[in-house]
Image (cartoon, rainbow, N blue to C red):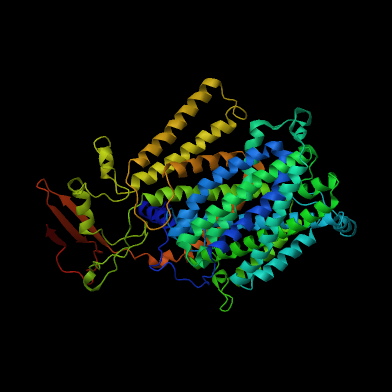
Amino acid sequence: MARWLPRSADLTRFCQKLNRVKTLEDDMMETSFNRCLSTIDLTLLGIGGMVGSGLYVLTGTVAKEIAGPAVIVSFIIAGFASLLAALCYAEFGARVPKTGSAYMFTYVSVGEIWAFLIGWNVLLEYMIGGAAVARAWSGYLDSIFNHKIKNFTETHVGTWQVPFLARYPDFLAAAILLVATAFISFGAKVSSWLNHVFSAISMGVILFILIMGFVLAQPKNWSAQEGGFAPYGLSGVMAGTATCFYAFVGFDVIAASSEEARNPQRAVPRAIAFSLGLATGAYILVSVVLTLMVPWHTLDPDSALADAFYRRGYAWAGFLVAAGSICAMNTVLLSNLFSLPRIVYAMAEDGLFFQVFSRVHPRTQVPVVGIVVFGLLMALLALVFDLEALVQFLSIGTLLAYTFVAASIIVLRFQQQKVDAPAPVAGGRPSPEPREGPSAGELKEYESFSDKLQLVDRDKSKEHREPGQLKAAFEPYLEFLSDFYPGEVVTVAVVTLMVSAICLCSILVFGSTHLHLPTWSYSLLLVLFSLGFLLSLLLISAHEQQRGTQTFQIPLVPLSPALSIILNIYLMLKLSYMTWLRFAVWLLLGLLVYFGYGIWHSKENLREPRPQRVSARYVVFPSGSLEERVQAVQPSSQPAAGLPDTDTEDCKR
């Protein structure tokens, strides 16, 4: 029976396949897309992706059902957490100006299977985002006509009472998605022009809402008679924060569009900063206005802003807000349909997803197959699913992507510049010229003499230390860590940090409620996991990191990404168990796709050198000399071709 068990070498090779990283091209500006987007284009794309969804979909829902007027605090916390994640996206978008967003960032730094799972969840994130906004778009338009569209559908088509499905099929939401899909297919310039028009109208409507809203504000709506400012307490505020993350996915749209930016090294960080700052300010001010105009418990979740003006006696203002909000939601639909096919294209181009989605139209220079297929899928979601269920499911995918991007920043910053495995030439010796690139996880024929010499003589050259090596100041205290390859300790510390963060947040969220822990064990576990988190952070900080790059870098690494990780994990655990259950089912489907297709068609398979039956041994003598012993390993039945008759070749230096 033991012979059927996999050998340790096979398991090692399998794990290396799962964790291999993407090798980037020498010229990362080369692309089959059209680099035509400026900083303004990307900024408006980000604003369009955030403002419509946050203001016209979530504000009323979170205020009435989750947080009350404290939705303001929820948006502030969500904005801060999104800022930490946005800085990570900005650094990656400037350093790796390729489409794919969180998928690409994870692939070049962490590993293939993790990148695929992130990309798989980002696909669902964009599909749900577009479908949810399309249903809100339909609801706002229906409110203008006094819900006649809804009544007609329920009367002539019928209704159903199924969990997580809408009460009736929303044909209007599906239709607008199909129209938006057609416009996106015409190319990036057409999409950008439409986004400019709708964004201008949306910003005009927001100014009108703020002016009229503060005129009609009534502070008594925050009084104890109406339930107070935070009727659901701190738990409601944090639960609302997790849901409010849906409003901040716009900067992800910017990162996904970096391959079509003219100067991504400058445009992507600036566009992310401008759009996130403007959107956060708009969310906070509109939340203040909405909860001061009418009592929070009387809000209409489907069309909160327009309904608030109607109830205050300004029917004309409500009509204007509803019409303007429809234009704002058009920008969200455009940004989702703009980014989704490009994520699919990046995965298909790497061989992890079906190859048909990597086709780019020669005239419009857009992945037209992905646009059409996923536009249809998005329309189907909008047709049958409930808005609230869609929004809850979207938040977990967004938070997971933020978490992995933050972890990828730490790994990449402390990662030594990798070299590809040298290509064999005549005589069986490798080429002496390495090619730079992040090729961690690739197999080598044998490690070079100079690599081992550098490890042996590390103590003799402390004046220059590579990224991932222990800092000179910590070497007397952590000397045992000097034996590891640069970056290995940091990678282990990042994993430990994430595990500690998960355990710490689990105790905070479930310790006193679901687990019913006594006070002493609750406090003890908090202290232990907090120490694990802090020690991991200090261990990472004790190593050298990459410096002197010409692109944007997030400050306070590893502290800033670590704060983003723990906050994102906490917010994920605040989501409902049904959200996690649906998320687990989606992950299982993704694993089936990866192991059934992606792992076999990955282009990194082609870059992996075939394992040569050669072993290398390095011996350090007391005198400080280094001997390299290369031994041919060959079957007993026949000699190895191309090798000398002697079994060993010794070289002393």
Q: Residue at x 22, y 50 (%)?
A: 455
- Please say whether residue 79 is visible from this viewpoint: yes
Total number of numbered labels? 0
Q: Residue at x 53, y 65 (%)?
A: 38
Figure quadrant of residue 228: top right
- Please say whether residue 582 is visible from this viewpoint: no
Q: Position of residue 461 (x, y in %)?
A: 19, 48
Residue 173 to residue 210: above or below: below
Q: Is residue 301 left or right of residue 400?
A: right
Figure quadrant of residue 342: bottom right
Q: Residue at x 68, y 54 (%)?
A: 52
Quadrant the C terminus occupies: bottom left
* Viewer-closest of 387 and 198: 198
Figure quadrant of residue 16: bottom left
Q: Position of residue 439 (x, y in %)?
A: 37, 60
Residue 357 to residue 473: above or below: below
Residue 46 to residue 569: above or below: below
* Viewer-closest of 516 and 153: 153
Q: Is residue 374 left or right of residue 139?
A: left
Q: Position of residue 274 (x, y in %)?
A: 55, 54
Q: Residue at x 44, y 66 (%)?
A: 603
Residue 584 to residue 343: above or below: above
